Each structure stands twice: as structure tokens, then as C-alpha cells.
Amino acid sequence: MDKLMIEGGYPLEGTVQIGGAKNSAVALIPAAILADSPVTIDNLPAISDVELLAELLREIGGEVQLSDHEMTIQPENMFSMPLPNGRVKQLRASYYLMGAMLGKFKKAVIGLPGGCNLGPRPIDQHIKGFEALGARVTNEQGAIYLRADELKGARIYLDVVSVGATINIMLAAVLAKGQTVIENAAKEPEIIDVATLLTNMGAKIKGAGTNVIRIDGVESLHGCRHSIIPDRIEAGTYMILAAAIGQKVVVDNIIPYHVESLIAKLREMGVSVEERDDQVLISNHKAKTGVDIKTLVYPGFPTDLQQPFTTLLTQAEGSSIVTDTIYNARFKHIDELRRMGADVKVEGRSAIINGASALQGAKVRASDLRAGAALLIAGLMADGVTELSGLEHVDRGYENLEEKLVGLGARIWREQMSEEEREQVKS
């Protein structure tokens, strides 16, 4: 078990390359189950969730080659093997196996998903969609059982805008008979990415990226090659990091349009952001002013950037209020920031930040993926050395983290935790 050592106070400068989108990858890999010939996905992020999904596809009979940001999946010999626990429990996005296996085999048994503990994230909208298509869904001994004689297209209205439910229903519907209409669909770029792959495989999908998606079922899908879009959350994290302690940092291989809400808030704070075709330049020479943010579904401010942005606001003059309307348990990093000297308190679904605080290095623990990013940024700004544990969360979403940060001039390295530290973590 490792911990990350961060020596703060060193200004960052240079260029950082952004990898493929984690939130696309975890849906695109299960989507390959639906094909009847090999699917190759490139620009994959080198993160633990991708490796877990590769192992899960091998468990159900797939041949998977993974190397150098590219995965080739041969689905011809896959079968509907139950996946009640084990690796399924380790990542939230394992629920995409439900839609893909239901679509392909008309049955699936998938353990209830794991991932970051961000409070209740029910899959009721997923189940509603599956049932509308003709599946029988039961919860038996902690696993979801899906069974259907056949799937038929239906009109499905999502009560809550959900990326996961939108994608899962798409996966189940592309091989169903007739037309499926998803209303109040999510509009995230990752939805478009998944629809692009499925269309290249032979699916008929219209409206991805709008709130109404129409899917005309087809008899079969074939393999193809697909390149994943850049990760807008990784890009946003490095943009926030550059605003926090950068001088001139170029965030390369991104789609600026995908992070417009973040760019607007950074500029409102007084940070210089120069947009280019596939990169942004963050220049940091002025004092920053506090701003209020509220997380919303895309194209609003992303909940996945709320935690890193809260850390940045500890260095802004005046008071700021951060409200998370998506996940009510996404303030677990606040106690750790306070341990480092931040003046922050939580009231309901909001955090109130009084800046600017002088942060001090401390021993802190990441409770989830984006909390880890928030505490990493705090460590880079703090005086002294910060010890960050809970790296299993961080490694789920950020590839080559130390390498990229060292390339920008950060003083950061990994160390093995002592037996005593490991016991403290377990308790």
C-alpha cells in the first residue's frame, strides 16, 4: 500500500498531455460485448478501472489484448456468465455490463456496483429502462438478475437526468426490436462518444447529445476501431491545478468546448485562460477572487470538478459558496482540507470557504477519486510535505499522475506505508 509524498510550494510550468476519457472508456469497453467481430478501442487511459474491465470481459469468455493505450476485444466466444461479486464490486461502472449483456444475451447477473462512496446513487432509472424494454429485473442476494424472452423498443422518460442510465438503456436497446426513444436523456460528451462507437458498429442512433435519443434496433452489430475523446475531467483537474500553483501551463489534447463552464469560472476568479484548437494556456499572475459555483448536469459545472475547485477557492480572496446538487456526500475532503489549515465549513449540500488560507502540509487520506485530486492540489500549494494515502481511489482516474506532475516541476514521489500506517488505515 503506497502513499504519495508532496512537497509543496514549487510553481508549475510546462505542458501536460491529457489522456482518453475515463467516463467514456468504462462504457465503451462493455459496449464491445454487443459486437460479433473484434472491436479495437484506442486512446484508452492507463488506469486501474480499464484493467478491471479487461479482466471481467475475459471472465465471460472474451479475448482481450491490452497494450499501449489500445485494447482489442474479440467477443465471438463470450457467454452470459454470472458476475455476482469479485471485480464487479471494485468499480461503479460495472453496471454497464448489465445493459450490454442484456442486449446481447437477453440475460445477465451482475453484482451491485462499487466505486467511490458518494452517497446514494441508485440505479432505479437503469432498471426502469430495462423493464420498459421487456426485461424482468430482480435483486437476489446482492446481485441484479436480468431476464428477457426478447427486447422490444419503448418510449422511456428518465425521471432524473442520468449519464449511466442513458448509456445503459442505449446498450440494451440497439439490438432490440423496433424503436426506442429516451426522453430527458443526459447530454454529456461521453454519451456522444458511446453513440459514435455503436453507430460505427452498425447501430442506428439519432439525437445523442440532445435530451431525446432515438434508437432503431438492428439485427446484429460488427466490430470496428474507435478512438476515445479526451478526458474533460482530467483536463479540468490540471487546469485547476495550474490556476492554483502554475505560472504558465499548457493543457494539451483537450476539447475546450467540453470544459466551458470551468473556463468561465476560472476567468471570473481572475485567472487568464487562453483557448486554442486542442489546448488551453493557463497563466497565473493576479490575485484570485472568490466565486460561487453550483454543480449541474452537463453543460453545467461538473460535480467531478467540485472537489478540486473547492481547494482552489481556499486561495481566493473573500468568501465562496460551493453547492453540489448531484451528490450529497461529496464533501468528505473538507475535513482533510481543514486539517491543512483551510477555513471551510459544510452546511447541508453547500461548503462555505473563507479565503485566502495558508495551507500546511499534513497527513491526509483520499476518501474517493476526486477528493484525492483535491488533496493533491492542496499539497502542491501547502507549506511543507503532505502525505496522501488512499491512492487506490486516485489511480482509478488519473494516469501517470506523478510522471505528469514531475514534468511540470512538482516535487512528488511515492513511498511504501509502514505496517503501523496500514493498520491505522484499516481501522
Image (cartoon, rainbow, N blue to C red):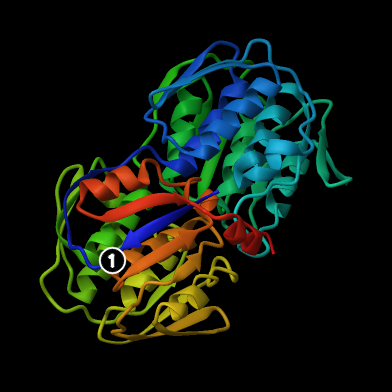
Q: Is mark 1 on a helix, strand or loop?
A: loop
- Please name the residue shown 41% across and 59% down the image: 373
Q: Name the residue under label 1.
A: 8
- Please name the residue shown 59% across and 36% down the image: 170
Q: Nearer the viewer, residue 92 or 144?
A: 92
Instruction: Name, please, the residue furthest toward the front.
Output: 419
Question: Does residue 77 appear left or right of residue 406 in this picture?
Answer: right
- Please name the residue shown 64% across and 32% down the image: 173
Q: Can residue 331 be seen in this view?
A: yes
Q: Can residue 208 be seen in this view?
A: no
Residue 21 x, y percent position in the rendering:
41, 41
Does residue 345 lie above or below 192 as drawn? below
Q: Which of 40 and 237 is in front in this view?
A: 237
Residue 143 x, y percent position in the rendering:
82, 43
Residue 396 x, y percent position in the rendering:
50, 45
Question: Does residue 6 appear left or right of residue 49 in this picture?
Answer: left
Does residue 410 lie above or below 400 as drawn? below
Which quadrant of the structure image shows residue 399?
A: top left
Which quadrant of the structure image shows residue 106?
A: top right
Q: For the C terminus, which image quadrant? A: bottom right
**Circle count:** 1
Q: What residue type is labelled 1?
A: Gly
Question: Does residue 389 appear left or right of residue 262 in this picture?
Answer: right
Question: Does residue 81 appear left or right of residue 5 in this picture?
Answer: right
- Please name the residue shown 23% across and 75% down the image: 269
Residue 22 x, y percent position in the rendering:
46, 42
